[in-house]
Image: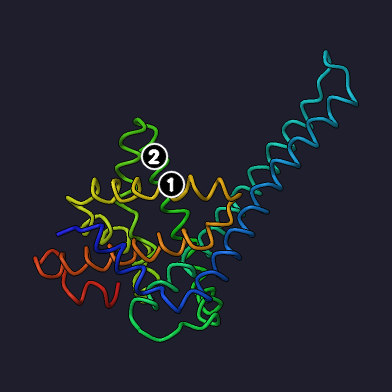
Amino acid sequence: MFDRRSYKQLAKRQLKGRMITPILATLIVTFVLTILNLEPMENSFRQLNSSIDNVELINYDTNIYYQTSKSYNVISLLITAITGILAIAYCRIFILLQKTLKVVPFAEFLRGFSYWLKGVLGIFWFSLWIMIWSLLFIIPGIVKLYAYSQMFFILAENNKIGVLKAMRISKIITKGYKADLFVMSLSFIGWLFLSCLTFGILNIWVLPYGMMSFTNAYTDLKNIALKTGKLSIEDFQSN
């Protein structure tokens, strides 16, 4: 049975006395993604302003527009790839925190970057299918977002599993529980609001707390699928 309260309560106990690595990882992920997402916006505004200052509006330079658009697309792909690499390394930290009572060293976060290829392939495959389903309407896109939401936990925990199989397993273990995962996401809105009031400082605790909670949910969903025969141990051992 999906029990978000128990996942969150357990997360607090799991993180107690072991917050250094999650905090450092959170700071790095947040900093890198913030910088990467600010840069293309800044460049776009700079180039657009430059084009307006140097040409008459009636003779707008379309070459600059297309160059800016092409550059933005390349940067967006790069940001997506880096997001995938960070995501799998970040998930790996919480998988390890769940499997041991010991402190997880920061080196384990860095070791997670060795899964960079799966991170890149995973985020592109994930984004592609979310985009395709979102074209139908926003609701199917949200439904599939939660159907595929366990992909990176699966990839981080099982290094022999490929991206396609991870997506298939995610769909299996979330079947019947997507609404529960959605409600669990909503339960963190209050914390995120408080974090905004602290200019994001509170995120160094809120984000690890949320990730640990969702890691517990992932493990429970996986165990439910194993107990009910939807999946077998062999499904998590190879492609």
Which residue is under mark 1?
Answer: 128
Circle 2: element type: helix
Rendered image quadrant of residue 152: bottom left
Quadrant the C terminus occupies: bottom left
Q: Give neighbour class at mark 2: few <14, some 14-19, many 20+ (Cα, 10 Å).
A: few
Above or below: residue 110 compared with residue 70: below
The spot of residue 26 in percent (x, y) is: 54, 64
At x 25%, y 58%, the residue is 5
Q: Amino acid at mark 1?
A: Leu
Pick the front one: 217 or 139: 217
Pick the front one: 119 or 64: 119
User: Among all residues in the image, which is located at the extreme right?
Assistant: 54
The spot of residue 57 in percent (x, y) is: 83, 16
At x 35%, y 39%, the residue is 141
**Cβ–Cβ under 8 Å for marks 2 and 1:** yes
Q: How many marks?
A: 2
Which residue is under mark 2?
Answer: 132
The spot of residue 19 in percent (x, y) is: 48, 74
In the image, taking residue 37 as reference, residue 3 lies left or right, namely left
